[in-house]
Amino acid sequence: MTATIELIVNGVRHRVPVEDDDLLLDVLRGQAGVTSAREGCGVGACGACTVLADGRSVSSCLARAVRYDGAEITTADGLPDDDPVVDAFVARRAMQCGYCIPGFVLMGHELLAENPDPSDEEIAGHLEGNICRCGTYQEIVAAVRDASRKEHA
Amino acid sequence: MTVDSSGVAVGERWARADGRAKVRGELRYAADEPVRPCRAVAVHRSTRPHARIAAIEASRAAAMDGVLAVVTGADLYAELGDRIFTGPAFADQPCLAVDKVRYVGEPVAAVIAHTAEAARAAAEEIEVDYDDLPPVHDVDAAIAGGGGYVHDELRPSAVFGDLKHLRGIRDTNVNYAYVLRTGDPEAARGAGEGVRTGDAGGATAEAAHTVRGDFWCPPTHHVPIELPYTAAWPEGDRIEVLSTTQTPSYVRQSLADLLGLPLNRVRVRCAPLGGSFGAKMYDRLEPLAAALAWTRRMPVRIAATREEAFLLTTRHGAAVTGSMSADADGAIVAAEADVRYDTGAYADVGPRITAKSGMIANGPYKIANASVRSRCVYTNKPSAGPFRGFGVPQVTWAHESLVDELARERGEDPAAFRRRNLLREGDVAAMGTAMHSADFATCLDAVTEAIGWDAPLDPGDGRWRRGKGVAVGIKAVLTPTISNATLQLNQDGSATLLISTVDMGQGSDTTMAQIAAEVLCLGEGRVRVVTADTDVTPYDTITAGSRSTYHTGNAVRLAAERMRDKLTGLAAGHLGVPATDVKLTPDGLVSAQTQETVGIADLLHAHFGARGTTLTTEAEFSTSWAPYDKETGRSPQVTEHWFAGAAAVRLAVDTATGRVRVEHLAVAGDVGRAINPALVEQQLTGAAVMGLGHALFDQLVFDEGQIVNGTLLDYQLPSVKDMPDAITPIVVESPHRTGPFGAKGVGETAIIPLAPAVSNALRDALGIRFTRLPLTPERILTALQKGTA
């Protein structure tokens, strides 16, 4: 059946019609103009589709949109211009092809919200479900570490 | 060659032009680009590895809601004829199966519908009657023949002219063979237990030490995280295509041939690629998308799922039977390799891989008697094509295992043994071409020093055992190839560079900008690179094989030098001094005589009498080769240049679980000159991480020709948890005499020696020589129980 749900995407309210089976990723890309969340595997195994829903990371390629009625969705392109995690990724050159990086940025945000001073092992543990095929992991871990220190300073 | 260098850009760690956009997710990849509303395409795929198509029942699918058309290979063949068969080496692959299917998952029919859901639902309703044929799954069984042939006859394509002589050959699954024979023919008479592929057998029989082995590298998949995507639409009498491809110029020619159109009626646009590693090149989704759009006169888009991406191309599985021999003084005197590449149902670029890696299958060593036979073999599997390293990691797995074992057989340190036998500057390798700008010894020394090769290993507690290993690698750059560059210097002193190199994460847009900026003394951010679009950017053979820094880089350098010469000419007129007196500097054009200076903006404003104008130059750069002799495999100029690299590993292995923990991984590559050291280090590290996956767990598993782990739930890729405790990328620079500022590429260098370096460390830790990849905990435990691999 078709339901109308409300998604607050990066602070902007969207009222969108969705079918029960519609995936959050498709609704965000198709009806809210989001392109920073992307399909990589369709089975929640790579993290390229990661978004934050009320601050929690979600694999939007698996999530049914209808369950997120009223949720505040954050995508990487909706982060503020001076976002410390984004700045740390840029400074650390934590990107090659860049396709997976927004997912890592959001995972970093989620971690630092829960644990403002994570160890490298805790950072790796939190990012484990995201795949960077270019192999930029050292830079990514360093960027999250830098962002945590910056947030403390 | 003398190259004027301003020192403003080359060697600097400029940030990627698109770095922040990538981090924020604002960079648009192909599927993010708004194009006209396209119809969705879904593909019905073969369930059989090898069968004749008896009948296709599509009427139910065609009648479903939202379905616009169901198209079969027979339908397209009726309109396009033999042009439906495409491919770089052999015109053997139809975009929809015609008459016969050759692998499980081959496209049989396409549904065009208003929505992707409708297209998928209809594709599932198509029914196909097959008459099964005997499938060929194994590469050695395929060579033996008798079980059936994947293709009735060989059909060389128009792309690679040197394969013409193979036309019409029947009753074989071997579509190409490369043979290398060097050394004393007399030596062959004494051939003993060697693999008997050439003259090296006699030398083997007389050597003091000989080691032999049968090696296997499984097929793997590239898995760039961006999925393949192609949109195609007719635009009046033209076809326009937006596609995930590393090879826009190739695709334009391929689609022009397919549709019978002149090149100026085919437009292929790219976007930055979300990784590729060889997956998105030559003919992938583009022929089907273009054929449907053109013949059905409607805009279509094909967005591959991850499961479909696994079927589009793979890395060749390869078997190598090899031997290597040393004399009493510890000189390698003979080496043999019999290499069999499993290229699957369609040859793609397999024949090129077969020759390019065959010629260096004995490694970067001085070997008097070398013998190689390298064959490209059809089987009933998804097609195998180019993958970072172009077949070379598979032969390196064999020669770097053999050379390590040979050193141990002699009781010599494996690094020292290699160092003594490595090819040096000016040495002519077995295939006949001399070494230049390929400093294997420095790479070897750098990686062994980085991991503390000579420091004693902590022996561990009995359960964990430690070991160290090293390997080197050699690869030829793709030759001959062509690059072009068009440079527009804008009146305000900014520049716009038009090239068809595709940035897929290697950072070519930044590297090429730095080369132009170096010549023109422009600062960071002043040169913008235009994304490849065949209507706009000039011909470039391909973005692959680590060729772009050298080839396109040289075209960019030449275009920039022509621009500099134009500017000095204009400035000479402006300042009233001879052109020889004018020098381009970061401050503008300066007269040495008068010290008078004019900036680029003022000079061009004065010259054109207008703002916003552009000054244009262009350049072409191509390389040539001497084709190798068909009998000996030798050529004095088989390649324009060489890649040289090394990897060293210290690891601990848990004898209770078989788990490997890499404590330190060092990789080095001779890049000639690092245009941007930060980008070079990322390429070295990234290739090492990918190679670590190939060493430890990464593989495609087949059962009766069907991929059984073709999803990312089942296919293991390196995650952040698989990282070594430390990775050290090392940039070695022995400038190439004709490289732009001495530079060469680096994208593949570190992946080549990676797996054998890990295996050699396991040999050191456990005393067991592994010959089959990957080195999974299960394989290690089994070997520990048996005491041998």
Image (cartoon, coloured by chain):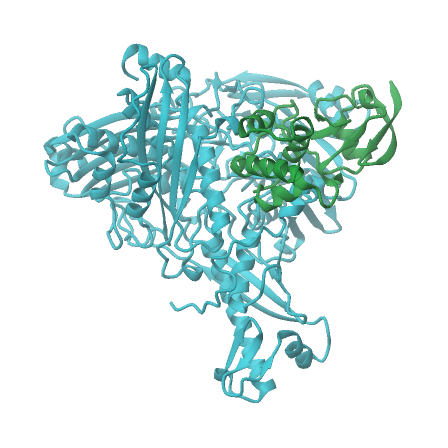
- Choose top left, top right, bottom left or bottom right for residue A143: top right
Image location of residue B507, percent across then percent down: 55, 49
Question: Measured along the vertical axis of the image, is residue B716 above or below residue B542?
Answer: above
Question: Measured along the vertical axis of the image, is residue B530 above or below residue B763?
Answer: below
Residue ranking furthest to the bottom: B576
- Please state which of residues A146 and A11 is positioned toward the viewer in this rendering: A146
Q: Which residue is drawn at 72% across and 30% down?
A: A51
Q: What quarter of the picture does the C terminus of chain B occupy? A: top left
Is residue A8 in sight in this rendering? yes
Q: What quarter of the picture does the N terminus of chain B occupy? A: bottom left
Image location of residue A115, percent across then percent down: 65, 27
Image location of residue A148, percent across then percent down: 63, 35
Is residue B155 in sight in this rendering? no
In the image, the chain rendered in green is: A
The answer to whether residue A4 is left or right of residue B315 is right
The answer to whether residue A137 is left or right of residue B474 is right
The answer to whether residue B375 is left or right of residue B305 is left
In the image, the chain rendered in cyan is: B
